[in-house]
Image (cartoon, grey):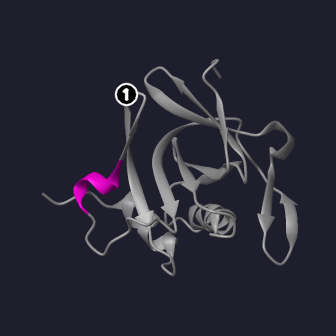
Amino acid sequence: MNAGTASIHASAVRVGNHAVLIRGPSGSGKSRLAFDLILAGRAGQIPPAVLVGDDRVHLATRGGEMWVSPAPRLAGLIEIRGLGIRACDHVSEAPIGLIVDLMAADAARLPPRDALRWRENGIELPRIPVGQGYEPLPLVVAALTTTESS
């Protein structure tokens, strides 16, 4: 990682070649969505999925991409509500390909195109704003397995 590394409260799962970065307030379901993505990968609903990091991850800009890596003390650990902290397979880093914002204030049934993009430091990524009370997994699976219509 480069000197521009920032630590944030988020989870990330590599799906195929790119990570899904999951942001949201405490208790919003970041760990649950991360584990759901891992299970969806095992079930063949999406490309193979493996944990990058849960609860706290590091971001860095490198080669025109945003990269995510686990916080060293939490690498390979994920919270499973009802079971506690569990060990699981993980990768040390991945380029981010999608951002999911849980309990997003700008979530809408038909969000404006601009709400579906995240831009920072010259990088633009697809984004899914998920409203409170909505199940995020179907939205993420749809984003990973379908294309936009014109």
Which residue, given by chain and number where applicable, does mark 1 sit on?
122
Figure check: 11 above or below 81: above
Image quadrant where one finds the C terminus = bottom left
> Residue 65: percent from the left, percent from the top?
46, 29
Which element is circle 1 on?
loop
Q: Main secondary structure of the magenta part?
A: helix
**Image point (64%, 33%), residue name:** 6
Point out the stretch of residues depicted in magenta.
112-117
**Image point (32%, 55%), residue name:** 116
Q: Is residue 106 left or right of residue 62?
A: left
Image quadrant where one finds the N terminus = top right
Quick one: which residue is furthest to the left in this view? 150
Q: Is residue 100 left or right of residue 110?
A: right
> Residue 7: percent from the left, percent from the top?
68, 38
Q: Is residue 2 left or right of residue 73?
A: left
Q: Per the image, is 85 magenta?
A: no
- What amino acid type is highlighted by mark number 1? Gly
46 or 104, nearer to the observer: 104
**Image point (82%, 37%), residue name:** 72
Figure check: 124 above or below 131: above
> Residue 50: percent from the left, percent from the top?
66, 51
> Residue 114: percent from the left, percent from the top?
26, 52
Quick one: which residue is furthest to the front in this view? 105
Q: Is residue 55 left or right of residue 141?
A: right
135 or 103, nearer to the observer: 103
Q: How many marks?
A: 1
